[in-house]
Image (cartoon, rainbow, N blue to C red):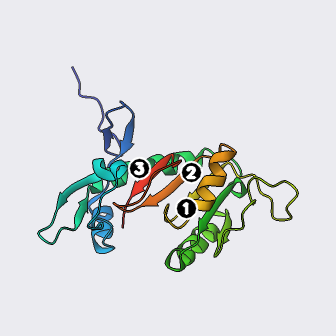
């Protein structure tokens, strides 16, 4: 019997049985250089499963394999949306606004930076009313207003979450610093 051809891209299997792309050595090196694996000293209950270890100083180390799997899952969701204008990237925190703006420019999504205006997703009379299909936030703690409003109208939420982040109403949490 002949061996089946090697796949072009290495795959790994999740506990759910779905297959995702493996991270390359360069991908892991980039994540390590960006300190994606370094969390905070505190751990929320929902983020406990993503913590790999703890340093002597008490800083939690995030499992990069879990981070990669969640990134691929989020990418698959975003690719499934036909119109990128149906995606909103939001950041209240100053350090996340530049990243969200660059993401929005490169992908063609909508951008909400700075203070989130209450009623953006729920008040149809409001001038800035929007109905996105997916909301991406950089920090669930500071972007809680956008997350809460999105949950009222059943908008799926993808967030970049540190080890101490609350995951209420979050559908996909990408564990990272």
* Circle number at residue 121: none
- Label 2 or label 1, whichever comes before in sequence order: 1
Marks 2 and 3, how far apart at CA: 13 Å
* Circle number at residue 157: 2
Under tag 1, what secondary structure?
strand
Callout 2–callout 1 Cβ contact below 8 Å: yes
Q: How many marks are shown on the rendered structure?
A: 3
Q: Left or right of 167: which side holds 121?
A: right
Quadrant in which the N terminus is drawn = top left
Marks 3 and 1, how far apart at CA: 14 Å
Name the one closer to the observer, 9 or 46.
46
Extreme residue in the top direction: 1
Q: How would you rate the neighbour count of disc 3 (Cα within 10 Å): few for under 14, some for 14-19, many for 20 or more?
A: some
* Circle number at residue 70: 3
Name the one closer to the observer, 50 or 24.
50
Residue under the point 37% across and 48% down: 46
Image spot of residue 81 (x, y percent): 65, 47
Image spot of residue 32 (x, y percent): 27, 69
Image spot of residue 50 (x, y percent): 30, 51
Q: Left or right of 23: which side holds 101?
A: right
Q: Disc 1 designates what residue? A: 137
Residue under the point 73% across and 55% down: 121
- Label 2 or label 3, whichever comes before in sequence order: 3
Callout 3–callout 1 Cβ contact below 8 Å: no
Residue under the point 55% across and 45% down: 77
- Label 3 or label 1, whichever comes before in sequence order: 3
Image spot of residue 93 (x, y percent): 53, 75
């Amino acid at each position: 019997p002949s061996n089946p051809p090697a796949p072009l891209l290495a795959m790994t299997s999740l506990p759910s049985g779905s297959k995702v792309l493996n991270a390359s050595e360069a991908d892991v090196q980039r994540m390590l250089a960006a300190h994606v694996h370094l969390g905070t000293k505190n751990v929320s209950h929902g983020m406990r499963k993503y913590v790999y270890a703890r340093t002597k100083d008490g800083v939690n180390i995030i499992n990069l394999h879990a981070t990669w799997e969640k990134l691929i899952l989020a990418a698959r969701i975003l690719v499934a949306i036909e119109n990128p204008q149906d995606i909103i990237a939001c950041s209240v925190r100053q350090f996340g606004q530049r990243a969200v703006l660059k993401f929005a420019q490169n992908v063609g999504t909508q951008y909400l930076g700075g203070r989130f205006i209450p009623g953006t997703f729920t008040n149809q009379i409001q001038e800035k009313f929007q109905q996105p299909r997916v909301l991406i936030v950089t920090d669930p703690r500071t972007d809680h207003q956008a997350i809460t409003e999105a949950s009222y109208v059943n908008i799926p939420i993808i967030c970049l979450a540190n080890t101490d982040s609350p995951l209420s109403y979050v559908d996909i949490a990408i564990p990272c610093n």
